[in-house]
Amino acid sequence: MTENMTEMSHIRGLEAIPARDMPNRAPAPVDTWHPEHAGSIDIVIDVDGNWFHGGTPIRRPGLVALFASILRREPDGSFVLVTPVEKRTIKVADVPFVAVGILLDGKAADQVVTLTTNVGDEVTIDKDHPMRFATGAAAAGVSLPYVTIRRGLEARVARAVFPDLVDAGCVETYDGDRWFGLWSSGVFWPMMRADEAGA
């Protein structure tokens, strides 16, 4: 059997999901699917956004994209793969995606920042896709930027991309104090107080 194809046999209903647009496929309408929970499946997303099954890397980009398109975060914070007929819990070490590319358009308050994830999602930082800073599993004590991709699923901005965010930043008065941060889509996203940033 083709490498990693065995994962598909463990998730009922997967064969009914159209295979279009892989690896840059559109997300499935998982919020409209309410199947029974069928337990866990041994799929793990590590802190770098790599997918594993049974400890073995899933190397087929199309299969990773298919799984990513049916991923949902539950109200209790768990992550599940959902089809019309069942859902299975998986493990996520930090967040499921990593922002590995950045596109900057415009300057200062007119700037728009678009990120590309490791599974091909493109998202613009805006009110519907906010950016936050937090110390996550991959942060090693440093506060790192996270951006909402969809339905509560987030991407952590890769360390290689972070300098581009900093270069696009500026100092503004925010919440009564001077902050260093980033403009995108008409919203100022504070990163750190200006005095802490040395600005």
Image (cartoon, rainbow, N blue to C red):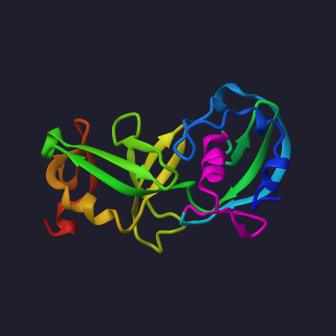
Residue that extends furthest to the top in the rendered view of this protein: 32
Report the residue at 81% width, 44% height from top.
11
Question: Is 184 colored magenta in this rendering?
Answer: no
Total tally of numbered discs in the picture? 0
Looking at the picture, how far across and down is residue 69, in whole percent? 61, 41
Please say if 193 is above or below 34: below
From the image, which quarter does the C terminus lie in?
bottom left
- Left/right of residue 125 with respect to residue 183 in the rendered view: right
Looking at the picture, how far across and down is residue 3, in whole percent? 75, 62
- Left/right of residue 34 with respect to residue 137 in the rendered view: right
* Residue span colored magenta: 49-74
Residue situated in front as seen by the camera: 56 or 192? 56
Looking at the picture, how far across and down is residue 123, in whole percent? 40, 42
- Left/right of residue 85 with respect to residue 184 in the rendered view: right
From the image, which quarter does the N terminus lie in?
bottom right
Report the residue at 41% width, 50% height from top.
116
Please say if 35 is above or below 180: above
Instruction: Place residue 153 in its image quadrant.
Output: top right
Looking at the picture, how far across and down is residue 149, in whole percent? 47, 43
Instruction: Place residue 175 in its image quadrant.
Output: top left
Residue situated in front as seen by the camera: 60 or 142? 60
